[in-house]
Structure formats: C-alpha cells, structure tokens
Image: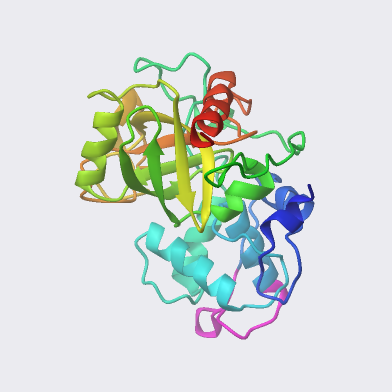
Amino acid sequence: MNFGNFLKYNNGDSISGDLNIDNSKKSILALSNQKNTLTQDPENKLKSGVTSEDVKQLQTNLKKLGFFTGDITGFYGDVTASAVQNFQKSHSLAVTGEANKETLDKLNDFVSRPIYVASRGSDARDNSQKAAPAATQTVAKTNPVPVSVQPAAKGGVTMMPWFGGVENVYSIGSIATVTDLNTGLAFKIKRTYGYNHADNETLTAADTAIMKRAAGGSWNWTRRPVIVEVNGYKIAASLAPFPHAGRDDMPANVTVSNRSGDYGTGENLDSVKGNNMDGHFDIHFLGSKTHGSNSIDADHQAAVKRAFELGSK
C-alpha cells in the first residue's frame, strides 16, 4: 500500500496532494548540529502572508524540532503560524503565531544544540542509569529502513509506521487518548518532545493517576501494549510508563537539578504543569527508534505487534 495514499491529507501551507513521506523523513531526520540561525529584524518579523528565504529557514528549523510537518515552501501560512504558536507555548513565550526576535532567538538556540530530547533508549533501562553526556547523544543522518503499513483490521486498529506516518499524525502539541490493553484503563496525553519516538505527558493529575494504576501502581520500564487514538486513527503502540528527565515544580526547558528518573542536572523536559508527573514518558510505534542509541527496541516492537493483535479482536 502506498502510505502517501493511506494518509491522504494536506501536510503543508501550499495546496498539495498526498503526503510525500520520503521528503518528510529526509527533512525531519536530517538533524544537524550546525547553527542555522535567522537574523530577522525584530521590527520586520516573520508573519502570515510573507514569502521569503527566511521563512524557508524558519520552517526548516521548526521541522528539525518536530513542530512543523509541512513542506518547506517559504510561504508563511496557517500551518507555519500554528507551528510557531506551538513552539512558543512549549517555551513560555508570548503566543502570537508571529516569529519575532525573541522567538527566533529561542529557536536558533535549540537548533544549535546537539540534541533536543534526553531519553537514553538502552535495551536494559532501569532507574539507576544516568543520562548520557549531551555531546554523545547524536542521531545518525540516515533514513530508517522503510516499513509497510498494516491495513486497519476489525475495530479500526492499524500498525502505522512512526517515520513518515505517526510522527506527522501525532505531531508535537497533539493530544491523544491511550488505552492500556491489559487493564482497559484509558487516559489522555500530549506529545511534547521526541523525534525517534513520541515523548509524552499526561494532561491532568487524574490522567496521571489512571496511568499509574495501569502500570501496576508504580512507575516502571515494562513495555505495555496500548492503542493511541489521535486525529481519527487508532494506532498500535508500546508504552513505557516511567516518567523521566523533568520536574513538574520547575519551568519547562530550563536547566534544573534532580530531574526525575535519576537524570541529574539538565534541561527540564516537563511542559505540562500541574499533572502530578515529573518529566515525560516514551511511547513507541512500528519502526520507531530509541533516542540514546538510535536503534530499534525489540521489546517495544513486540508490544506494538501485541497491541495490534489485541486491538483487532
């Protein structure tokens, strides 16, 4: 099945046809450590209706961080404005949808960093692991091996590939409902970080309590088969219910100490406040990879397949 035909939705500011997966993957995965900065005059900010090379660079930088999923056109339309708004929300900036100097400075700062997320991704994760030094947390600049889409079965559940698929359907800032297939418990989440897989946070303290019940009463790295419902899709996935790398009592994306999961000092990867959860947790999909090792986790993939089997009954 052609996955571009499978999704069939407009993925950019310009009028376009099917989603171009190869270009999307190429743009999102080609993460670079070089500083692709913008030096826009603050009085001549980038905003809706503008067409320029600066807009192209803005779209490119937003795509690298997972906020923009459209085509790089150089036209500042509704999709670009929405991506800018989501970036501004995530970094406690004034939410205007216009890329002013403050927004561009923050964006340039993040693009110049070696990595944006802190998940370690080891096959033997446990609470005693320390975060790898930022300089070692790199991502190979190669596209993953393409995977085919498993057609939706009874119940509408599908095994949608992460790269070129779920990463766009469940983009950063999107809200989804997760159903744990072993317990039947459901809770709401928001994707706040991640590029090789989804880094997520619960929406409310009530959602956190439900998720902890589903995990057996305590946080752990056990891979759990789940269904993620987002934007009309029911997608087989694997949940690792262990919040890490953040503090709920401190501002998002600033340097803090004593981050959850024994991550020590580093960037506070906790955007949703007041949910009684410190940090974020991982959800993997078909063909997704870890962040620390940039590799496919066999246990997560087994849980994804189990989720598809259970969800199709």
Q: How many marks overall?
A: 0
Q: Is residue 32 visible?
A: no
> Residue 44 in magenta?
yes
Q: Position of residue 31 (x, y in %)?
A: 66, 45
Residue 191 image position (x, y, % from top left): 44, 49
x and y, in percent, of residue 261 in the image:
32, 26
Is residue 230 among what the camera can see? yes
Query: Residue at 76% across / 69% down in the picture?
Result: 17
Decide if residue 215 is on the left or right side of residue 15. left
The picture quadrant where one finds residue 95 is bottom left
Q: Residue at x 39, y 43 (%)?
A: 178
Task: Locate residue 43 relative to residue 272 in the image: left or right.
Answer: right
Q: Residue at x 59, y 24 (%)?
A: 293
Q: Nearer the viewer, residue 218 or 235?
A: 235
Instruction: Name the chief secondary structure element in magenta.
Output: loop
* Vertical order, 9 against 242 (above or below): below
Q: Is residue 313 magenta?
A: no
Colour pattern: rainbow
Vertical placement of residue 4 versus 119, above or below: below
> From what the image shows, is residue 206 above or below residue 225?
below
Measured along the vertical axis of the image, is residue 252 above or below residue 282?
Answer: below
Name the residue nearer the viewer: 83 or 36: 83
Name which residue lies at 65% across and 57% down: 36
Residue 190: give x, y in percent of width and height. 39, 50
Which span of residues is magenta-colored? 39-54
